[in-house]
Image (cartoon, rainbow, N blue to C red):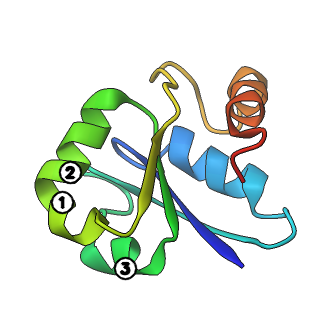
Amino acid sequence: MTRALFICGKARMRSPTAADICANRTGVETDFAGLSNDADEKLSSEHIEWADVIYVMEQRQKKRLISLFGSMLKTKRVVCLNVPDRFDYMQPELVALLREKLRGLL
């Protein structure tokens, strides 16, 4: 079982969408969190410990993740999906983009 954690800014649109579309994949367990102080599900050390692979939506989020949890990431695979913050939750264009970006990664 692979545990995939999806991270964006506020955990409202991109990361919950990614977690939901991957949740039905065989052998994959998903969760999501946000890096912003006002995120709906704020990223914690428990999220990092739980995850096998961590997907961030933007390079700046990867940098912030490393600055906050760098020592915990040594054994983790961190992947930047380069998905811009211009979509709504489960918007068809976001779903299609995430499926394309995640093909072969999970």
> Is 74 left, or right, of 103 in this rendering?
left
Query: What type is the residue that disc 2 sits on?
Result: Ile
Q: CA distance from mark 2 to mark 3?
A: 14 Å
Q: Are marks 1 and 2 in contact (CB under 8 Å)?
A: yes
Task: Please give the name of the residue rendered at 45% of the width and 24% of the height, measured from the top-left corner.
Answer: 85
- Residue 67: % across, % down: 12, 50
- Residue 5: % across, % down: 51, 61
Residue that mark 2 sits on: 66
Query: Callout 2: helix, strand or loop?
Result: helix
Q: Earlier in the sequence, mark 2 or mark 3?
A: 3
Query: What type is the residue that disc 3 sits on?
Result: Glu
**Count of marks, rendered view:** 3
Q: Which mark is drawn over residue 53?
A: none
Q: Can see residue 36?
A: no
Residue that mark 1 sits on: 70
Hey, which residue is sitting farthest left in the picture?
Answer: 67
Query: Callout 1: helix, strand or loop?
Result: helix
Query: Callout 3: helix, strand or loop?
Result: helix
- Residue 93: % across, % down: 74, 20
Q: Earlier in the sequence, mark 3 or mark 1?
A: 3
